[in-house]
Image (tube, grey):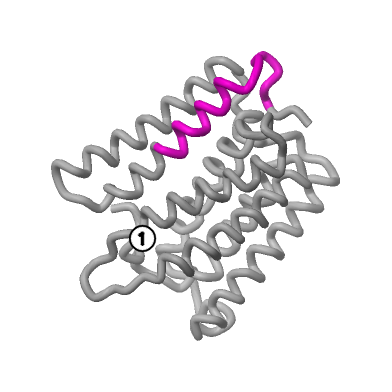
Amino acid sequence: MPDGGGHERGLGRPVVEAAAAWAGMVLFALFVRSGLPWVVLSGAGLLVTALAVANSFRVERRPAAILGFSPVSGKVAAYLILGCAVGAGLGILHRVVWEMGALPRGFGRFVFVAVAIGASEELVYRGYVQGRLRRLGWVIAVLLAAAAHTAYKAALFAFPPEGVVIDLEFLAVWTLIGGVVFGALRELSGSVLAPLAAHVLFDIVVYGENVQAPWWVWS
């Protein structure tokens, strides 16, 4: 199934654009909480990602297709519902494993930020990166997009504040698994809406009661 690449030839440009967006987001995550002058590298990473996406829009001129959106159909709607169920289920599992209680006790101000972050990550990884890599085959695209998301997440958590211990191996394994599940939803549905809904519901369930942002949030 073609994915917004009707005017492009070969694999070179889409793969290079996906790789640039991947590298830019890792650079952003590594330095986003650093002070001057290193935080400038974070901005440079975002710029690289933005330029890669902008170039794709310039060449293809179908932003919706580039980001993985497709016309809403019965199939897309069915997978959208499945995505909501998957995201909520994974969120409950996360809370139970970490002894947080099965469901949030309320909703704090941070829930809106959590939703925005989750949606943005899906548009970048399952939408843009996975979409650009589909010319390599959808299985490879799912795995590489999941790996890109995992690299970003590991970079974001790589330098925790003093006193905070992060099991990066655990984080990487489960981010990769989640990325594969979300990527499969994107391929099976033909739309980024299903994984986007899954990620948003996951973040609502996990972080819904937070009033303040956790330390790892972009700041």
**Closer to the camera, 196 or 55?**
55
Residue drawn 41% across the image and 65% down it: 168
Type of the residue with mark 1: Phe
Residue drawn 27% across the image and 47% down it: 31
* Main secondary structure of the magenta stretch: helix
Q: Residue 132, position in %: x, y?
A: 60, 31
Q: Residue 143, position in %: x, y?
A: 62, 47
Residue denoted by label 1: 157
Which residue extends farthest left?
A: 36
Q: From the viewer's perspective, is residue 63 above or below residue 7?
A: below
Residue drawn 19% across the image and 43% down it: 38
Q: Judging from the image, what secondary structure is the residue with disc 1 in?
A: loop
Q: Residue 126, position in %: x, y?
A: 60, 44
For the residue carrying disc 1, how many other residues have a C-alpha within 10 Å: few (<14), some (14-19), or many (20+)? some
Residue drawn 28% across the image and 65% down it: 160
Q: Magenta residues, as a range?
A: 4-23
Count up the numbered dots. Answer: 1
On the image, which quarter does residue 64 sit in? top right
Q: Based on the picture, tell me whether residue 199 belongs to the magenta stretch.
A: no
Q: Based on the picture, tell me whether residue 17 belongs to the magenta stretch.
A: yes
Q: Residue 199, position in %: x, y?
A: 58, 57
